[in-house]
Structures are given as C-alpha cells and as structure tokens.
Amino acid sequence: MNDKLAGLTQAQLDAHWMPYTGNRQFKRDPRIITAAEGCYYTSADGRPIFDGLSGLWTCGAGHNRKEITKAISQQLETLDFAPSFQFGHPTSFELAERITQFMPAHLNRIFFTNSGSEATETSLKIARAYWRKRGLSAKTKLIGRIKGYHGVNFGGVSVGGIGANRAMFGPVLDTVHLSHTLLPENRFCHGQPQQGAYLADELLELITLHDASNIAAVIIEPMAGSAGVLPPPEGYLQRLREICNEHQILLIFDEVITAFGRMGTATAAEFFGVVPDILNTAKQLTNGAFPMGAVAVHQNIYDIFMEQAGPDYQLELAHGYTYSAHPGACAAALATLKILERESLFKRAAELAYVLEEYIHQLKNLPLINDIRNCGLAAGLTIESAPGEPLQHPFRIAMKMWNKGFYIRYGGDTVQLGMPFITSSEEIDGLVNALAESILEVANGK
C-alpha cells in the first residue's frame, strides 16, 4: 500500500471532485492529511507538517482543541438538530449575545449562516431589503473591489474582484468595482502602506455615474486576504466610511478572515478604527471545528425590519438556511470564544505579528520576489511569473514547502502565510527559512 494514499483506492480518489484544486495533478501526487494537533498536521506518510495558514485561516487557536471537541460532543448528545425556522434552541441565543461582545458598538443583531459565502449572500440581501423597507427600492446596485474575495455564491462572485472566480460562469449580478489598493509605490511596505487613501474617492465617481439613489451597499475586505494579504492604505477605510455616510450607502466589511484574532484584535474594524453597518464573519468563529458563519448587523437596520413587517407573526426577512445556528456549531463557537479570551490569543497574535513582519521582510532580496506585504498575523508575497505560466512558481514553491514539512497557501501569483495564534517565534523563523530555501530552489530550476 502506498502510504501517501492513506489506504485510499484510486476509485475513491477519482470519485471526489475537489474544490479549488488542480484535481489531475493532485490525484497523480496526493497530499493527504490524516491528523492534526496544535500547530501541526500529520501527513499520510507520517510526517509532521507545520500549519502555516491556520487551516484555511480557520484554526488560530490550534488544532484538535479538546475543549471544542467536548463541547460539540456534549451538545450533539443532548440536541443534535433543531429547526431554526419559527423555533429555536438556547445555545443560539447565548452565542448571538456572546458574539456581540466582540463586535463594534451597535452591531448587535446576529444572523447565523454556515460559511463565509453564505454570510456574503446574507449581508447583500439584507442591504437591498433594508432600502426597500425604507421606501427606496431603486437602491439595488452593489459595489465591490478588484481583487476582493467574498466567497463563491453568485452574489459573492459578483461583488468579488478575482477574475478567475467568475470568468467561467457567465453573467452574474449587476455590480461595479473600485480599484484595488496594490500600488507599485507601496512595494515591500511594512504594515499599512502610506500611499493610496485617494483611491477611496473612486467611490465618488461611481456615485456620480450611477447616482446614490441606486446604490445599496459597498462591500470590501478591510484587509484583503485571498488576493495575497493586501492591507488598506492609511486613511482609505476612513474615507470610504465618510463617503458612504454622506450618500446613504451601507458599508459592509467582509471579515471572514480577519475577525476573531487575525489582526490581533477582535475585528479588523477595531484594528483600523472604522465601524461598518454590517460585518461578516466565519472561519475563526468555530476554530474550523464546525461550519458556521455570522452576520453582525447594526441595530438601526434590524429595527427597520421589525417596524415594517406588519403583524408580529409575519416574517421580517424571507431568508435563512436549514443549518443556520446548528446546535453543534453554536457549541463549537462558544467554546472557541472562551479559549480565545481565556488564553489572551488576540494579544498573542498581535505580538507574533511583529515577529512575522521582521522575518518575512528578510526575503526581500531573493530572486522571484516582486513584493512582500504584512498586516496582523498574515503575510503575502507576490512571485514573479514563469514564462507563459504565471501560476507555476507559487505552486512549485508551495509543493517544495510541503515536502519540507510546511503547509502554506498559493493562489494566483502569490504565496500566503497566516499561522496559528499559538505559534512560537522559533516556528515562524523555521517557516521563513524553509520558504527562502524553496524560493531559491525554484529560482534555480531545481
């Protein structure tokens, strides 16, 4: 038996159409994970693999936390499922109130989803419905941003600005996009770049073109993650907030990656000092142990729905998911938030962010490196394209890292790092050294 296959047959491998994966290459050379503990995975051939991306930005408290496992198990033994339409269970209400303790003031009404993609759909639908409730039904247009990522449902790929995520699917929602903030003059910047706040004024141009009376919301990632860790220029988010206020446009922050610790704070809204009208979360909410997302909505928005709904037994919002506020997910989230708070992991992530910044920028002069960015406990490197194959170098670097015992993310022309909050400085040093070796090997054609 091939140890790399973990006992799987070729038929079993072939049957699974894997998401966001080059299936043909993977099934020729599988990378199977069989266990996890702390900051490490175990590969099918028994090697420890340092988790350089916290799962998929999900497992900041480390893998296989017994407190979370126990909480899920106890919940499922008591109540495995409860309908969330017209009925409820205690844990969802407890969790909703608990989440509000981490959110900016007045973002205190929580709608549960099962993923970041569903959180996007929910926030966009709430935004459109809100203006209809206000008697402004023409306000339907949505504004995203180039290089933005908001999940993979039709609303998300419409407001998202990564071309490959929408090119093969044909027409999507009618949306327009702000420019990204990745500017040449900010290359190799440490933390937030100084240049680029003026790009927020592009929103004024879109308002002139489409008129504020037709625009429902602007949705952005405060720090774009999937495009390669793009911190906002200083003053950029503040300016967007000002313009949205002036023109009665809702501002939505997609914090699926940044909420609950990645920035060293509870939210990126707190980190950058800007409060949106709606804030999307997922990933770190349950430490990756159970699928869940949540949308935090300003109370004023919620109140409009309540006031405009007719008799109290009628639906205020015709939207939801079968598994919204699943009991197991709620238990996982409550246990996760307790760990994050008890172990001061936001503070720990903030401290490690300085370590990552120091180490990652030491790679500046290596071949193939076109840019390095960092913000919070996250970093992205833009990699020089191979002739005719712009995605080849990041893929090869990531594969060499896997062979050296490190898991990192490759996407587009970037490689990305986002290690767990419980990582040590020595582990960050080891990862960055291995990354330097891998980059040199690929640059030298090895």
Image: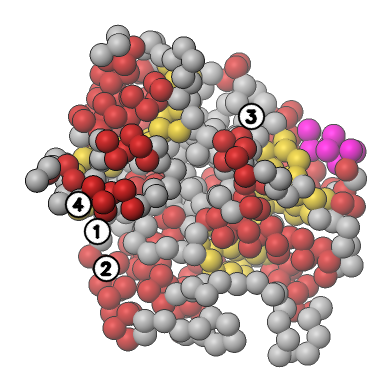
Q: Residues within 10 Å of mark 4 (few under 14, many from 20)?
A: few
**For the magenta stretch, what is the residue range?**
202-209
Q: Position of residue 34 (x, y in %)?
A: 20, 51
| Mark closer to the observer (2, 4) | 4
Distance from Cα at disc 3 to Cα at disc 4? 44 Å
Compare marks 2 and 4 and give the one earlier in the sequence: 4
Label 4 residue SS? loop
Distance from Cα at disc 3 to Cα at disc 2? 40 Å
Residue at the image point whose x is 49% and y is 73% from the top: 323
Distance from Cα at disc 2 to Cα at disc 4? 26 Å
| Residue type of the residue flagged with mark 2 | Thr
The residue to which callout 2 is attached is 69
* Relative depth, front residue between 183 and 429: 183
The residue to which callout 4 is attached is 8
The residue to which callout 1 is attached is 64
- Magenta segment includes 271: no
Distance from Cα at disc 2 to Cα at disc 1? 7 Å
Q: Is residue 315 left or right of residue 33?
A: right
Label 1 residue SS? loop
